[in-house]
Image: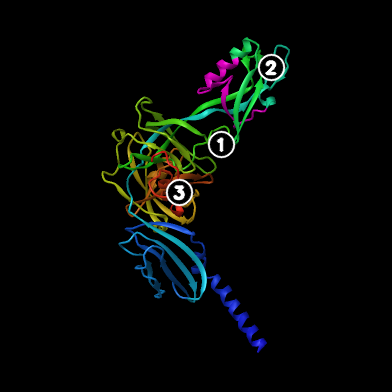
Amino acid sequence: MKNYKKLIGIIFSLMIIAFSLLPQFRNIYALPEQIVIMQEDLKVFQTNYPFTMTVNNAVKSEVTNKLDSSLQPVFLDSVKLNSNIVEFKLLGVIPIKEVAVEVIQPIHVKAGGQSIGVILHSEGIMVVGTSPIIDAGGQRYFPAKDAGIDVGDIIISINNKIMKKDIDVAEAVEEAGKNNIPLKIEFKHDAEIKEIQVQPVFCQQTKRYRIGLFVRDSAVGVGTMTFYDTKSNVYGALGHVIVDSDTSQSINCENGKIVQASVAGIQNGKAGSPGEKIGRFLDVEQLMGTIDKNTDFGIYGRINKDAIVDYYESELSVASMAEIETGAAEILTVVEGQKIEKFAVEIEKINMQSYPKGKGLVVKVVDNNLLSRTGGIVQGMSGSPIIQKGKIIGAVTHVFVHDPTRGYGCFIDWMLMEGGIIPKQNNEKIPSLFG
């Protein structure tokens, strides 16, 4: 009898191992723990024997509680907005995976694609480099570095005066040097606020007083708008964080703006050398929108709708990650002047995610027109909305350095959460500047 039970146990274990090798099992196990879907799209999952699904409604018991037809897709309640727990079981007995599915109201926004000029002012003055100061005797000095300031630190104030522009730092250093007094510098290192004293040194090469730092108070560049909401006037663009070009650290945004931009030319991409849009700001005084947040999923602020020319007259629906399929899609972007054009791409891979992460999509350019004009995805294309079956599903974010025809995209879910337009997972709203 003992051997019989042991044999049954071995057979059962081998069956589980065999089932775990099935593509269905891997697909189910790879599902995120939480998914947000729009009410208008109700197809959530589909599976086949030997896997079954149970849908338990956490709000109303009216939703179908048991779905034993293992060859049919699972549909959630078409009327109610519900929190659902979808449980996958092997042979209807062994729990494999639970997925929390939140059904929310449909979202409609205006698709972007416009080229934008980005002018972002940092919170304080960023240290982007150090250099030696050589005095009359040829001696080399690094006053600020030796006192503890490093690349990536943020200078907040000097001698109790808030630093807003890089010229403010230069003027404070020159004045202290001429009067032979030390500088009291307050700065941020990582998340810690520190205070030091630095004595300026007269530089024989530049004929002025210096402390051995290169600093920057702003960043500028060209990107692409992804969407904007006509009700709140909130926009999202870029799909990734803006970092300083020298330090590769994200820029803490104090204030900034976007302005209209035009593409004057394209430097084509090739393997090992990503291309870029050669952009031109049209009028830095004409405000297209504010920059209030610089996040892992792009920049956000309020838009001036009068300064925008749209590709589509009407709003487009938004598709959550659960609706996206591999295959044909399109992107909107500008490659010449200010004209938004539509180009064919393919969604090659979908990395479904429980929590906000980048690189949720792998996108390949298949449009010969775009390939001949740019070589594929180029810098400045970040934020170009990705559209599938008439719905916005995400934004282009990065190019593969070794293959410019392919790149990454982020889900529109994460951008809408950052903009405060849909709730964050677990029904917690992301702290928003937009109310």
Residue 106, compared with residue 67, is above or below; it is above
- Indicate which disc residue 249 carries: 1
Give the extent of the magenta segment: 148-173
Q: Residue at 53%, 44% (x, y): give it.
A: 401
> Residue lying farthest left?
313
Q: Nearer the viewer, residue 90 or 162?
A: 162
Mark 1 neighbour class, 10 Å CA radius: few under 14, some 14 to 19, many 20 or more: some
Q: SS for tag 1?
A: loop
The amino acid type, in three-letter code, at marker 2 is Ile
Q: Is residue 149 visible?
A: yes
Left-right relation of 292 to 6: left
Residue 80, compared with residue 185, is above or below; it is below
How far apart are the alpha carbons under marks 2 and 3?
A: 48 Å
Q: Residue 84: which quarter of the image?
A: bottom left
Q: SS for tag 3?
A: strand
The amino acid type, in three-letter code, at marker 1 is Gln
Q: Nearer the viewer, residue 11 or 123?
A: 123
Mark 2 vs 1, N-terminal side? 2
Q: SS for tag 2?
A: strand
Left-right relation of 30 to 262: right
The amino acid type, in three-letter code, at marker 3 is Cys
Q: Residue 190: which quarter of the image?
A: top right
How far apart are the alpha carbons under marks 2 and 1?
A: 29 Å
* Residue 1 x %, y %: 65, 89
Task: Tell me the quadrant of the picture where the C terminus can be found.
Answer: top left
Mark 1 vs 3, N-terminal side? 1
* Residue 188 x %, y %: 59, 31
- Indicate which disc residue 134 carries: 2
Which residue in the structure is indicated by mark 3?
A: 410
